[in-house]
Amino acid sequence: MKLKSKIVKLKKKIVNDILQFAGGENILKRYGLIVTIMLLFAISIVTFAGKIVFTPEGKKWREVGKRETLIENRVILPKRGNIYTCDEKLLATSEPLYGIYMDFWADGMKKDTLMKYVDDLSVALSKKFPDRTAAQYKNSIVEGWKLREKEEQQIAENKARGIEKKVKLRSRYVRIIRPDISYVDLKEIQTYPFLKQRSNRSGLISEEKNSRKKPFGNLATRTVGSVYKDLAKGGASGLELKYDSLLRGVDGVKNRQKIQGKWMDVVEIPAVDGIDIVTTIDAGVQDITERALRNKLIETEAESGTAIVMEVKTGEVKALVNLDRLSSGYYAEGNPNAFSYTSEPGSTFKTVTVMAALDDGIVTPTDSFYVGTGLYEYKGKWVRDHYWRQGRNRGYLTVKEGIEMSSNIVMSKIAIKGYNDNPKKYVDAIDRIGLRKKLSWDVPVHGIEGTSVIRYPDDKNNYWSKTTLPWMSFGYETRIPPIYMIMFYNGIANGGKMIKPFFTKRFMKNGKILKEFEAEVVNPKMCKDSTLAQIKDMLEGVVIRGTASQAKSELFHIAGKTGTALIASGGGYGGGSYVSFCGYFPAENPQYTCFIGVRKPQRMAYGWQTALVLKNIAEQIHARNTRFTMDDFEIDSTLQKTPAVKNGNWDKSKRLLAELKLPYSNQGHHSEWIQVKQDSAQLEVQPLEVKAQVVPNVKGMGARDAVYLLEKSGLRVSLSGAGKVVAQSFPPGSKLTKGTTINISLQ
């Protein structure tokens, strides 16, 4: 009890001493001292802040801080719009690539660490990008660090001398890898020695750029066009140039700012991506046409060639091929031959002459003209038929036979009979048909490219000679490019309605249609109905028994006209020849019009050889478009093996299985996406799980389903090959980063 009493007394004493020491006056004094110190500290902060804000010295330090932590007004390049086929397969697309640099002034970069790993890093880079040796990579990196040391030394010297001259820090942005690389490669090099550190320690800078890729390679490359190597300059040719202002989008603005020691992009104004262009081109028809023309050019060793396939009713150009011979002998897409072949067309123009004469009532199909042995002299110049060297007297040929046998004499005599006294009437008839109309095209052309040049008797710039009329009647002394010629023959196939061929089907943005296009009507009625029927009968006769009889098809009728013209050169016709065929198929119900032109063949070539090219194309298109049902086949019930079915969208697969009457088991699931397993008896349909923020499994899918699912997940897609997906660069189930590019391979 005594001890407890003593403790209580001691506590009371301590409390009394504290209260005595901290009397009211002392508390106020100490409180006042603390407040005074805080006020002085606040005043000093305000003073220094004001000094930084309002004095020249402050401006200097603000600039230093800004220079060290902020890079302003850097351009954000928008994604250039895609160019698609008519069924929205990619012809041209933008793919992100990355320029790789090192910032040797990075805050956390240490020389000893860099030198420790530089050898291993250089070896890894040389294996991945072998355009440089490991020694060259090492030298580039070491020189970058030495450059920083020189800059540090210069800064120190300037400071010691009181010089305020700014030192340009070239070591902040040193290119390490020469080529721009893909996102997949970027992720790989970030695992390399030294570079796997945070960027403020490794100094790694990846500058994203857009590049242009053509999944179909050189298919329709002249029509699609090209862009400059520096994508910011935009389109250089073709549709890329024509619609450059729409495809390129609108630049954005970003600042590059150092935050917590790490450089980050801060978007000020987001970029606006370009508009997508859907063309009329059909990739399948384009491929068929290109291969058929290339084979003929190789066979005849020609200088160049062009082929056009146009849909009769719509005017949509389904294929446009322009091939030129390279020094290596290989044929590749080059000049816009469909527009730039402005030489004399030859015998394909004879149909124009006969249409004009029939419509003007000058001749009938059965009217005949004497051709003899194929030589006819008119005002001191000889008109020759292709058989004139044979010496055989053919007597008289009717107008119809003149077209079928491609007689120059018949054509010239028709023109002389009907228009010799008034040649203006002949050209007026051509005007009436629509071939002299000046047109613009949805691909870029220059000068007289893509424009017909047909003389008129009063034209002072193009002299109308005494022999112009008869020679014009069979395709000379006039210039008509292939695009005009196919437009004319398509008008015949289209019931006399001439429409302008076009290549751009619609504009799209984010899957929504912004604008759709239709063919422009050039002439709603080229000629009388009776004339049209007679012309169509003659053109069928050309293939049945005339100059293109070798091109007869057992599947359907083809109608058209052959053409062979000598090419003017040096005041004569020693520039080689130009052979062509223009026609449509099936003749009884025209679906497509086709033009084939071969320029300067080295081996003997005639119009019928180009007709064979058209036949080849026509039969392949016919086979491609023919659709069969299971009722068209007799199926052997003893066959047990079921056909392969791709993974993909369940609704589409279900319709296919039902149409083909294939047995399957789906275990009662209702998934949107499925994978198909099969054995000899039936197909087993299993659900394919698709999760958010996870890379989906597209193996076994067709290109359309795979691209749709991946893009829907937020990925960009780069594909190669054809068939079904056999590999994807990001494994299924891995974490998904939106906006990155996944590569898929098909076979």
Image (tube, rainbow, N blue to C red):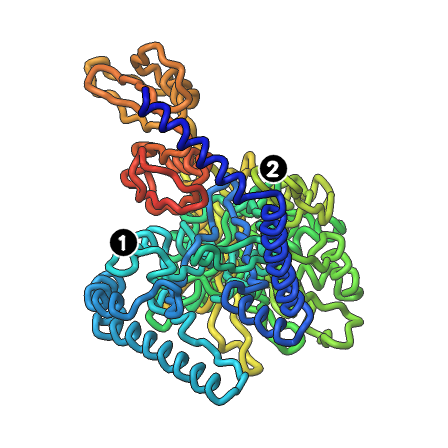
Q: Residue at x 61, y 75 (%)?
A: 57
Q: Quadrant of residue 636?
A: top left
Residue sitting at the far top? 668
Percent x, y for residue 532? 66, 43
Q: Identify residue for label 1.
A: 191
Q: Amino acid at mark 1?
A: Thr
The answer to which of 591 and 60 lies nearer the viewer is 60
**Is residue 390 visible in this depiction of the protein?**
yes
Q: Residue at x 36, y 28 (%)?
A: 6
Percent x, y for residue 354? 66, 53
Answer few, some or many: residues within 10 Å of disc 1's Cα (few below 14, many 20 plus, some between 14 and 19).
few
Q: In the image, which is nearer the foreground, mark 1 or mark 2?
A: 1
The answer to which of 355 and 252 lies nearer the viewer is 252
Percent x, y for residue 384? 54, 68
Q: Which quadrant of the figure contains the N terminus? A: top left
- Above or below, 746 against 300 in this view is above
Q: Residue at x 25, y 57 (%)?
A: 192
Q: Quadrant of residue 407?
A: bottom right
Percent x, y for residue 128? 25, 60
- Above or below, 458 against 402 in this view is below
Labels 1 and 2: the sequence-earlier one: 1
Element type at mark 2: strand
Residue sitting at the far front? 2
Q: Amino acid at mark 2?
A: Lys
Asked whether, in this view, residue 580 is left or right of residue 434, the answer is: left
- Give residue 512's mark: 2
